[in-house]
Amino acid sequence: MDHERPGRSLHVLWHGPGGPAPGLLRALGPDPADLRGPLAWYPGDGPGRWTTAVDLDRVDAGTLLVPSLVPLQSGTEAFSLRLRWIGGDADLSPIRLEDPAGSLAPWPRATVGTVGREGARAEAGLDCLETLDALHGVRLELDVLVPKGPPRLDLVVSARPRRLPVRDAGPTAPPLDVPAFSQRERDPARAADACSPVSVAMVLARLGLAPELEDFVRTSEHPHHERLLGLWPWNLARAWEAGAAGVVRTFASARDAAHVLRAGHPIVASVRYGEGELPGAPMPATKGHLVVLRGLEAGTVAVHDPAAPTADAVPTAYDRGAFLRAWLADRGVGYVFWRREDRP
């Protein structure tokens, strides 16, 4: 999985029967994905459980790996992912696609922190992995609960260097119409932590799938992690329940973003910035915040920032250079959604 072109995002894709979902291919942007073929499934440990594994081979040091699961039909209830390599392993947080209050007991909780032996270390997050050393023999194992299996789904692993210089050749994309919601107008018990589900809900509303907002925010809290409403695959799962498929992918340049925006897809972008680095933002600084990027103009970007105090104040324009640095310099992660394309 080495990056042949340093500084670019790479999307490695294994697909279900019939090939990848068209919406997924559009969401991955102008660079073709590394298609690895169909997933091969085997009965797992227990009724309705299925398992598969895919090889990522060698992964360079300083690489961010972000996996996403895209179901192709209803009936996929839950899943768990584990990354293994020569010298270490890490579990990601298990996810329920249906019935978020249901049990996740069959799977271990997520590994968090630095793991692996010296020379084969990685930083394990709840929904991603950052390699601290070059890793060899990397393998992604997937367990899925599908009572009427085998599973039908696409699996994507997006990767890019964790930190990159911001690349902007100046492409533009007209602002998309997106309904505006403020996280500050939600239940005070969750308002400060609700940027991710509220941003996702804005995009769902654009798709004509507006959920009941308070319930959507409430069920976006992962049962293993109190007050954590921003876990990327958990929010994908809540969007799936609402009628939208989606992917969490990495971006490496304004060109990547412009292509997706021109295809009609707003991007729920994960930004981080220090004091004064994003002028006009309602949050003066953040180590992690989600906003909806809906357009790229010559000197500004059109953004819905859910941290604004009211829905009327959510639509805003940020300085283009400042925003791209806050988003693309570190991680460059974003959600992209489309209406579900269930297959028989």
Image: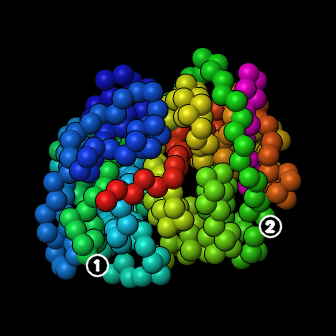
In space, the residues marked 2 and 1 are separated at their CA atoms by 37 Å
Res. 260 visible in picture: yes
Instruction: Please tell me which residue lies in front, 243 or 125.
Output: 243
Amino acid type, label 1: Pro
Can you give x and y, in whole percent of width and height, for residue 344 in the image? 31, 59
- Is residue 284 one of those drawn in magenta? no
What's the residue at 49%, 67% (across, down)? Answer: 241
Q: Which residue is mark 1?
A: 106
What's the residue at 76%, 24% (across, down)? Answer: 299
Question: Is residue 59 shown above or below 291?
Answer: above
Instruction: Please tell me which residue lies in front, 65 or 273.
Output: 65
Can you give x and y, in whole percent of width and height, for residue 300 in the image? 76, 29
* Count of labels in the image: 2
Scheme by which the image is coloured: rainbow
Residue at the far front in the pictured view? 344
Q: Which residue is mark 2?
A: 185
| Relative horizontal placement of residue 226, taking residue 140 as reference (left or right) | right
Can you give x and y, in whole percent of width and height, for residue 167 in the image? 56, 23
Q: Secondary structure at mark 1?
A: loop
Res. 160 visible in picture: no
Quarter of the image where one finds residue 110: bottom left
Amino acid type, label 2: Glu
Can you give x and y, in whole percent of width and height, for residue 239 in the image? 53, 61
Q: Residues within 10 Å of mark 2 (few under 14, many from 20)?
A: some
First reached walking from the N terminus: tag 2 or tag 1: 1
Instruction: Please tell me which residue lies in front, 137 or 196.
Output: 196
Q: Which span of residues is magenta-colored?
A: 297-306
What's the residue at 39%, 24% (across, down)? Answer: 6
The numbered mark at residue 244 is none
| Relative horizontal placement of residue 186, taking residue 28 as reference (left or right) | right
